[in-house]
Image (tube, coloured by chain):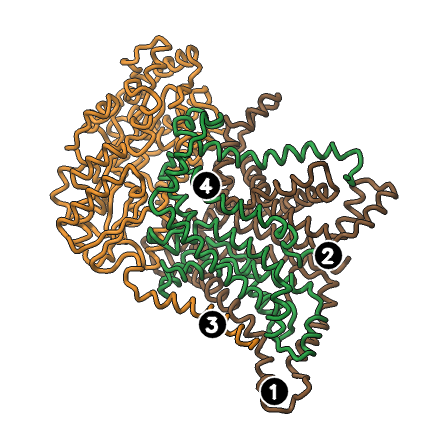
Amino acid sequence: MSRLGPSRWLVAVPMTLLALATIYPLLFTANVAMKTRREYVLDRFSLASTLRWDNLSTAWNSDGMGRYFLNSVIVVACAVALLLLIGSMAGFALAQVRFRGSSTLTLVCLAALFIPFQVIMVPLARIMADGGLIDTYPGLVLAYVAQFLPFTVFLLTSYYRAVPTELVDAARIDGNTLYGVYRRIMLPMGAPALLSVGILDALFCWNDVLISLLMMPSADHRTLMVGITSLRGQYSADIPTFAAGVLIAGLPVLVTYLFLQRQIADGVTAGATKG
Amino acid sequence: MSPIGSSGRVAQAGRPDGALAGEAAVDGRGPASKSPRVRNGRRAERLAPYVLVAPAVLIIVVLRLWPLGLGVNFSFTGDGERNGATVGFDNYAELIDDPLFRTALRNVGWLVLLLPVAVAIPGLLATFIYLRVPGHQIFRSVYFFPAVLSPVIIGAIFNLLLAFDGPLNAVLGGSGLGPVDWLGDPDVAMFTVVGVHIWATSGMALVVFLAGFSTLDPALLDAARVDGASLARMIWHVIIPGLSRTIQFVVVTTMIGMLTSMFGLLYVMTSGGPEGSTYLPEYYIWVQQGQMSSPALASAASTVLFLVMLVVGLLQVGLLRRAGRED
Amino acid sequence: MKQRTLWSAILVAGLVALAGCGSASDPDSAPGGSKGKLVVWDWKSGDATASSYVKKAKADFAQQHPGVTVEFVAQPFEQYYTLLGAAIQAGKGPDVMLFNGGGQIRDRADSLLPLDEYVRDDKKRLAGWEAFTKDNKTYAAPVTLQGHPIYYNKSLYRKAGLDPEQPATSWDEFVADCRTITKATGARCFAQGNKEGIGIQFFLSGLGSGVLSPKEYDDWIAGRRDWSSPAVERIFALWKEADDEGLNNDGANSTAMFNDAFAVFQSNKAAHVIGLMSDVGHWKDFAEFLDADDVGVMKAPVVTAGATPRLPYDGGIGYAVAKWTKDPEVAADLVRSLTSPDALKSFHADAGAIAADRTVDVSSAGPAVATIVSEIDRGKPALHVALSSKTVDLMGRLSQQLLSGSVTVDSAVEQLAASDRAG
């Protein structure tokens, strides 16, 4: 039953239109991926004449796409695991423990939140090169961790701040060290927040092009999104193949979302919603 | 502690307890505080929070703030023929003289002003879904879709949809309204890009709002409706106060999104045009760095951008914190 | 026990960093620099159409230097120069890299090796060197020629009752023909895309030789640009007039030259387009949609009496060698292999380019190419290529303002003059 009363249809109509507007671009992409280049240039909006999978196989079979896919999976998995570990440790300590310098350290993390990547791009590349990290998996993982850590710490701090401190006190009276509290109570308790933050981080890393390009200059170290972007040449002539690449890159994300939808909905920054 | 996301109540309630916990750590008030083993433990406990924070702070300082510092340093050197030479504030003077950079900063101002819209849209949608508009379960899933697409892809798709001879204008033309040059009119283009950004990101905010609604007491709403309150009054008197913390959270995350991650969309949709009207500082930096081969000027722009972000960000956080205290 | 978990976690984080440092000593992981291996950056080698070109160039190079491996890294073009800039600053750039001719390579000449002593023998065989030359030093060897012929759709001419083999030679006739075509077929005169400010570049170079006197043209290329001359002003006024009078497709400012404007031409919605000679937006592309025999190339219509229309072209893309490469001679040999006749022949055939090598046979590529190639000998460098990146960028913005009416021709030309003097 709607709680909206008779006006509900008045609202439902624009919301349906909006929903259609949300789905349409996805369908459009799928449609373009089925077209030949000729069909696309002559009329980009008409329906593809037949279901044609050539573009998908072209995109997938273009040099090293399988390799890129694997690279992406490895790098994103490592980066997200590290982000969650480091982020939750810091988030817990900053939210629940009072210690000298904590507000300064919080401010440091907060300030880093406001640095667009373009701002530090070049100096960062130089630092990474000096450290011998350019073109290595750990280098890219580290770059991702650095990029998304402020956001992760911020979200997890606000999550842990909503956890009643009595819990921590009780655990400490039971003789737990701070590490014990973190590991036994905070880590399991943060699971919903960790899951949703993890999904966000994974999305960011998966969709990134710029950082990956900068950190991984060799061809066989590329990530999937870079591979897809490279399908567009200087003048991006073959849009249907590019659209097919977009589908290939987007599909795993979409499937993951559909599977984890409930958890995302329930968990996204549960800390932000208490009270 | 962090000013972000802590409504006054929680912060004030949390602080004494936090302090207690901290003191407990420092004092090591345990049952057997005399034995040497525990004394070691006390030192370890005192260091514990630092150990927990250390990796995060280390990474942030070395890979975010240090490069920022290098950039600032670099911004006082020259480009091209003056490569490497110290030029004082010349780059900054050049920035101020560049109308393009001024436009970029003005657009940042627009973004800040448009922030409430970017928060209100997902907020309203979430409200209707929460109030079970017909089809709410479908909306709930569908509205999130764009959040999984990368900005580059979203931009590429909307480029086609918003083209002058694209389908949106076909619809507008068919309904008697003239076509709008969404991406070609300098007075419109910036809003078009922001609109697409909101479209792309509001799915995430919507989900956060819905999570917030799940903690709202439905009895309050029912009571309001029994009293015959209109929807607007319900939103104003029940939902907004009830969700203050959620709203703050969305405001801060949306702001960060708008100020730091519109680059992809801009790049694909307008490349800063038409007439330079959609330049943002990130894009300016990118162009100077790459196409114009002026890395030092780009560094100066980076420094200015960071300062602007910091001021805007902290101001906003401060305002929210005060608002949080008042309720 | 509980602490162990935490410490092991921290250890993992540390190890990741260490592993990174460890792999620093692995010479193969760093791009560029190492002896016995050359790293090449471009935005071409990833295209399927360039694969036989790369294969042939590699084979040619392997004959001379069997012990040296070559790695091609195809970068997305959009990020190319930014990545290159970052790599140069980080000291981790490639050994050999592709450049567009003109401003892009001149701005970065500091980081490049002058190639004159290595490419002496190729100077005659290849054309287009000027676009890669700064202060009399050559920094890259041209692979393709790039220029801006005016393509026209012969079938639209026929439908409008015009003689497709006799396109207009003066601007007034040209405009009159356009009116006839629009009346008969509904097609506009020009397919115009100025979203990125590219439309004006093509317009300036494509029509410029019909406006400037031969002397003014040569002076412009030589760097003596008289912005106050009436002819220069005329070009920008013409740009505005063309749009005001409906010669362009609608929404030129929001139409991307690549590939939207070309799509307009390909789908018979406009009769002319100022296109390219190589890569895309050219004879090969158009022939895919229109009949190859229907794609014509015409000279710039004469606007000012005394002007001599000429094909505007320059070196298109070329490979350069980084200053820091370990063995310049080997790297230069790779550049020579990349411009060898055999390699360029495949590049012309597969990728659809007018190769810089004048000995490459183009007779099978259709009538449009024949016209273009016959004009090359009398051709001149393109007007916009002579301008600095900064001025070209400003011109893009001003051209959009001209179309929307927010700047006057006088003021636009004045601003361009100031930018040209400064840079």
Chain identifier of the orange chain: C
Query: x%, y% of residue B26?
Result: 64, 81
- Which secondary structure lies at badge 2? helix
- Which secondary structure lies at badge 4? helix
Q: Which mark is residue C38?
A: none
The residue lying toward the viewer, choosing from C155 and C160, is: C155
Q: Mark 3 and mark 1, same subunit?
A: no
Query: x%, y% of residue A136?
Result: 37, 60
> Is residue B200 shown left or right of residue C61?
right
- Chain bearing tag 4 is A
Q: Which residue is mark 2?
A: B323
Q: Which mark is residue A246?
A: 4
Q: Mark 2 and mark 1, same subunit?
A: yes
Quarter of the picture holding the N terminus of chain A: top right
Q: Are marks 1 and 4 in contact (CB under 8 Å)?
A: no
Q: Which residue is mark 3?
A: C11
- Chain bearing tag 3 is C
Q: Which residue is mark 1?
A: B38
Label 3 is placed on what type of residue? Leu
Q: Mark 1 and mark 4, same subunit?
A: no
Residue at (14, 33) in percent of width and height:
C359
Q: What is the distance, in whole Å, between disc 3 and disc 2 at their CAs?
A: 42 Å
Few, some or many residues within 10 Å of mark 1 (<14, 14–19, 20+)? some
Label 1 is placed on what type of residue? Val
Q: What is the distance, in whole Å, between disc 3 and disc 1 at their CAs?
A: 25 Å
Residue at (20, 46) in percent of width and height:
C58
Q: What is the distance, in whole Å, between disc 2 and disc 1 at their CAs?
A: 45 Å
Q: Is residue A64 above or below residue B296?
A: above
Q: What is the distance, in whole Å, between disc 4 and disc 2 at their CAs?
A: 43 Å
Query: x%, y% of residue A49?
Result: 45, 25
Q: Are marks 2 and 1 in contact (CB under 8 Å)?
A: no
The residue lying toward the viewer, choosing from B36 and B104, is: B36
